[in-house]
Image (tube, rainbow, N blue to C red):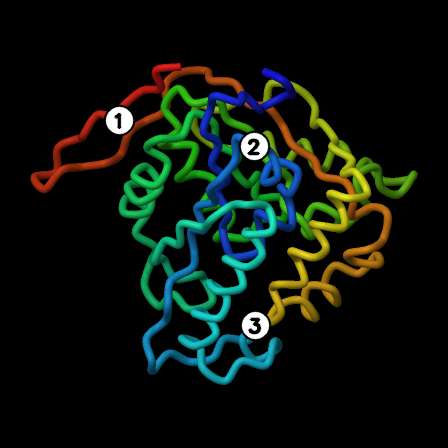
Amino acid sequence: MTMLGMNPDSKTVVISPHPDDAVLSCWDVLTRPDTRRVVTVFSGIPDSNARLSAWDRLTGASDPAARASERREEDRRALAIADCTPTHLDFLGSTHRTDALDTAALRAAIRRAVADADVMWIPAAIGGHRDHIAARDAALDVRGSRTCFLYADLPYAARFGWPVGHPNLDVKGWLTAQATGIPGNSLISEEYRTTLLSDSKWASKIAALKEYRSQFAALRAAAENGFPTGPEWAYEVFWPIQLKSPAIDPLLDGEGRVVPSPRSTR
């Protein structure tokens, strides 16, 4: 590999819980030549009679379905700056779900979406957002023998300073404790690693973030710390993960039988 997590002959896919999460947290990976696709998990379109969520109201939406469609278009424009394209799955985010999330269907959809991938970058769910947790757990469950990394979710991961933090707080311990709390057979293999974006790459990330026009003002207010031009926002953090045992394959056929997943042939 020419750099950690990159092989010019591999196919890398980034799992993004919502439109904007991959760009916020994983820009360095998105701009690599082996990364061309992002699977955006919770990008479903609510029914026409759906109520506005609190976040919809905060960001000035008047129609939840129209806003969800708008966010998909924003995602396409932002990812195009990195020469990537999104695969938008049809699961509703937690702000619009009225029924329990079908986790089996979620795993099956992600499994299909990453079928040709050798490498997966998966949100660590820092901050505990339930959509991030669901996307993380489903992706880990169907990873097979792929090389996988967890990325620290921004802006949540910067809550106490980033990437070092306040001198009287153990931000490193806080980040690692959350990332090592993942269920199943995965294991953080070592302490987190930090990527400092070059000036040009940081500038392109800021340009991509500004494509999320419906969300940008709220993101800037929530993130604080000079987002996105403050110096700490040029950093991204990730963890390599190793396998303790093969991941489960939860995809079932029409009669409820487990369908084996294809293993990587790398």
Q: Which mark is residue 33?
A: 2
Mark 1, residue position:
261
Which of the two discs, 2 and 3, labels the residue nearer the N terminus? 2
Q: Quadrant of the C terminus?
A: top left
Establish if 138 lies above or below 156: above
Please report contact status of discs 3 and 1: CB closer than 8 Å, yes or no.
Answer: no
Discs 2/1, front? 2
- Compared across the picture, whether 45 is left or right of 183 comes to left
- Compared across the picture, whether 257 is left or right of 54 comes to left
Q: For label 2, count other residues whose C-alpha is less than 10 Å away and answer few (under 14), some (14-19) or many (20+).
A: some
Q: Quadrant of the N terminus?
A: top right
- Compared across the picture, whether 169 is left or right of 28 comes to right
Mark 3, residue position:
55
Look at 32% across and 75% down and name the residue there: 47
Discs 3/1, front? 1
Q: Position of residue 128 (x, y in %)?
A: 58, 48
Query: SS of the residue at dot 3?
Result: helix
Q: Amino acid at mark 3?
A: Trp
Q: Amino acid at mark 2?
A: Pro
How far is disc 2 from disc 1 in space, using C-alphas?
26 Å
Q: Position of residue 146 (x, y in %)?
A: 43, 23
Q: Amino acid at mark 1?
A: Ser
Q: For label 3, count other residues whose C-alpha is less than 10 Å away and answer few (under 14), some (14-19) or many (20+).
A: few
- Compared across the picture, whether 154 is left or right of 264 comes to right
How far is disc 2 from disc 3 in space, using C-alphas?
35 Å
